[in-house]
Image (cartoon, helix red, strand yellow):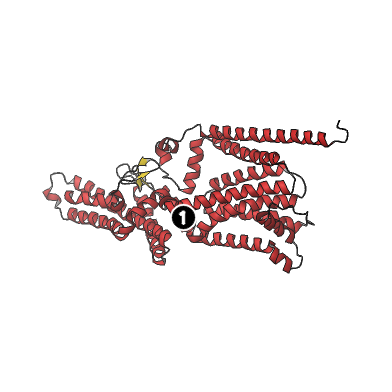
Amino acid sequence: MLFLSRDAARKGLYISPFASHQVNALGLETTPMMWIFEWDIVDGSNSVLSTIYLASREQLDDAIAEGYEAVETAQRMQALLAGIDPAQVSQPELLAKLGDSLAYEANLFETLAAYREAFLRYYQWLDTGEPSAASAWKGALSRYDALKAEHLVRYDGDQDFPAYNFFSADIGMAHAQRAQAMAWLARLWLVLMLIMLLAGSGAVARRTPDYPGKAGLRAVWQALTAPWKSHEAFDVRTADWLTGVSLPFVLIALCYLTFSSFLSLQYALLTLVMLGVFVISLLLLNWRKPRLFWLATLAASLLLPTALLMLTAAVRGPGFFWFNFWTNPAGRTIFVSLDVAAILWMFFVLYAVQRATFGRSVLRTLGNLLLAVGATFVALGVVPALAGLEKTLTAINDQMAVLPLGLSRILGITVHLGIPLELPTYMMAVGAFLLGAGALMLALSMWSGRQRRAILSPGFD
């Protein structure tokens, strides 16, 4: 039994293809048992599990099989114990304790083996899209759920044989279970975006009669494709507000909820607050007619970055984005480059419409954008400053399962990753600087305008 115990523990607690590598993540050297986080939290974060799958991809069947081999070894040890005659032992009561220990080991390793198969097959499906991998991880997940429930019933509260903590694994698997549904939702939102844009395009608009909401759709299309042109005010009807303003903003909100698998209201709320502060700031700085076109512009400018995120989620759910973000440097670079380009186009759209439609000066337009960005930075700093940075990061990560959820339970995310607690203050300081720069530009624009009017005044001598 003693000679077998090392092999059982090595295969049951470690995933050999990963454990045999030295892996660094976020500037830290990871432990070889990273999927079980110090020391009884079974992890479900996509950063850890993506990396483990990547290290095990070429030996995936072996990595899964060794978990079940550990169970067989533990059961063999139980059989050896059953063959011992209590009469031949000086302290027979110790045999019962040894039996309890082996029963715990067999139960734990069987639960861990099922979870190991579930997450490795899930990430194989994210990587390859193979239907067999999808079927395998769903079957393993059902076994894991049943075994975990039995494990918790038997050992929860037991001080000698404590139950393992599966809260992180369950959150990760909750996201996995919604992956296919979220992929279909992402495709639906993309199709609706495309229909909305095509319905407002010039080619379609010229061929179709006037109908309720047409002006709103037209405003979104024109704002996104020709923001440098001054567009005339439309004969606005209630339906135009719905199609040109409400529809795109609702789609954007649904996209970010979909990216969180409707499981992380903290993430979605923080994202929508950030976008809301940015949009409302620009709206207040340009509150004059044509309001429909300007509101449609604010919505249209956000569509490209949002659609780019949905394109990745539409493949195999939000997990596909995170898997490639952690394991595919080339894909990560391409996505970040496209995202930066989409954000730059967003700012250009907002800049061009203010110049063309509102007749803003360059200084006034840049000042408005700086004020909006500054207000957004201040808002992003205020939230964690009031709630606490560690608490805010933990709340978001506990729902999104991006980083190991055990981080905040031990030293804290900020301590583990060296994140300065003054970060919210820094963000608010940057926001205040941008607000000051924007206000200065507005003041210079107003002064320049007064000087120009004075020169052009008929009474000027």
Q: Give residue 130's quadrant in the image.
A: bottom left
Q: How many numbered marks have been drawn onto this rendered protein structure?
A: 1
Of all residues shown, which one is farthest toward the left? 88
Mark 1 closeness class: few <14, some 14–19, many ≥20 residues within 10 Å: many
Residue at point 50%, 52% (across, down): 335
- 383 left or right of 171 in image: right
Which residue does the numbered mark 1 point to in the structure image?
319
- Relative depth, front residue between 388 and 286: 286
Residue kind at label 1, given as amino acid type: Gly
On screen, residue 365 versus residue 18, left or right, reads right
Q: Is residue 182 found left or right of 62 in the rendered image?
A: right
Q: Quadrant of the C terminus?
A: top right
Between residue 55 and residue 361, name the one nearer to us. Answer: 361
- State the image coordinates of residue 442 (x, y, percent, origin top left): 70, 36
Residue 150: in sight, yes or no?
A: no
Whether residue 446 is situated above or below residue 44 in the rendered picture: above
Residue 55 appears in the rendering: yes
Q: Residue furthest right?
A: 459
Task: Give the residue at x 64% y 39%.
Answer: 370
Residue 416 to residue 345: above or below: above
Q: Position of residue 163 (x, y in %)?
A: 35, 47
Residue farthest toward the front in the current orientation of the protein: 461
Question: Toward which corner of the image does residue 199 lie, by quadrant?
Answer: bottom right
Identify which residue is drawn at 78% across, 56% down: 234
Indicate the position of residue 224 as horizontal and vertical percent values: 65, 55
Q: Residue 5 or 221: which is nearer the viewer?
A: 221
Q: Secondary structure at mark 1?
A: helix
**Residue 107: x percent and y percent?**
30, 53
